[in-house]
């Protein structure tokens, strides 16, 4: 269950926004962003978000864990086109058993939302290759929270 009202998640380190200008190589012949390329924009925002509390992918690996994405969903509300400037917002929504990061994509000029979605990541211990059913203590330490 996602508890977006968890006061521990109100820390500004758990939300970020990045700007993207849509490049030509991301669009289809109609000039609209191909649906699969949105995940690249989410990845850039997700990495920026994780770095804000010092748990980017290099820090994850150094801590003995990898966090593969096990589920991803997107809702396409309005098309995004070549050279359009967009803002991708990533917000940590859940962390106790997995990382759930919610995303909103906005047109930079109008502020109109074009896309929404989320990703789910789970911790996997590198040495044993076992999935963790609770987030490892290192994540909580990096976040500065306790359960």
Image (cartoon, rainbow, N blue to C red):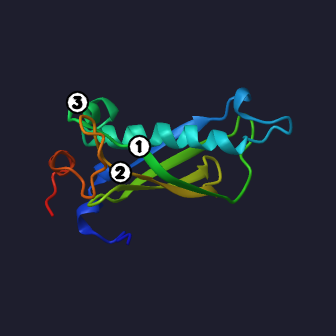
Q: Residue 38 location, x and y as percent?
A: 62, 43
N-term mark: 2 or 3: 3
Residue at the disc numbered 3:
62
Q: Where in the figure is residue 81, as x and y percent of width and height?
A: 74, 41
Residue at the disc numbered 1: 68
Along the viewing direction, whichever of 70 and 131 lies nearer the viewer: 131
The numbered mark, 1 or 2, whose residue comes first in the sequence reads 1
Taking the spot 72% from the left edge, 41% from the top edge, the residue there is: 33
Residue 32 visible to an observer of this rendering = yes
Badge 1, how many Cα within 10 Å: few under 14, some, many 20+? Answer: few
Using the image, determine if residue 111 lies above or below residue 23: below
Task: Say which element carries label 2.
Answer: loop
Residue 28 in which image quadrant: top right
Q: Residue furthest right?
A: 30
Q: CA distance from mark 1 to mark 3?
A: 15 Å
Instruction: Say few, some or many: other residues with alpha carbon within 10 Å of mark 2 (under 14 / 14 to 19 / 20 or more).
Output: many
Q: Is residue 45 above or below residue 98?
A: above
- Across and down, in percent, residue 37 comes to 64, 39
What percent of the width, then of the height, locates residue 95? Answer: 29, 58
Q: Which mark is residue 3?
A: none
Q: Secondary structure at mark 3?
A: helix
Residue tagged by mark 2? 122
Check contact, mark 1 vs mark 3: CB within 8 A.
no
Mark 1, secondary structure of its residue: loop
Against 55, residue 115 (above or below) is below
Quadrant for residue 29, please give it: top right
Give how far apart the Cα atoms at labels 2 and 3 are: 16 Å
Residue 9 image-quadrant placement: bottom left
Q: Earlier in the sequence, mark 1 or mark 3?
A: 3
> The N terminus is located in which quarter?
bottom left
Q: Residue at x 49, y 39 (%)?
A: 43
Q: Are marks 1 and 2 in contact (CB under 8 Å)?
A: yes
């Amino acid at each position: 269950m996602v508890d977006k009202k968890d006061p521990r998640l109100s820390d500004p380190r758990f939300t970020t926004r990045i700007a993207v200008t849509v490049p030509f190589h991301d669009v289809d012949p109609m000039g609209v962003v191909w649906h699969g390329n949105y995940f690249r924009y989410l990845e850039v925002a997700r990495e920026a978000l994780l770095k804000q509390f010092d748990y980017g992918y290099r820090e994850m690996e150094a801590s003995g864990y990898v966090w593969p994405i096990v589920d991803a969903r997107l809702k396409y509300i309005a098309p995004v086109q070549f050279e359009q400037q967009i803002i991708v917002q990533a917000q940590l929504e859940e962390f106790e058993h997995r990382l759930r990061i919610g995303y909103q994509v906005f047109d930079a000029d109008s502020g109109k939302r074009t896309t929404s979605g989320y990703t789910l990541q789970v911790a996997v211990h590198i040495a044993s290759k076992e999935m963790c059913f609770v987030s490892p203590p290192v994540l909580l330490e990096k976040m500065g929270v306790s359960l």
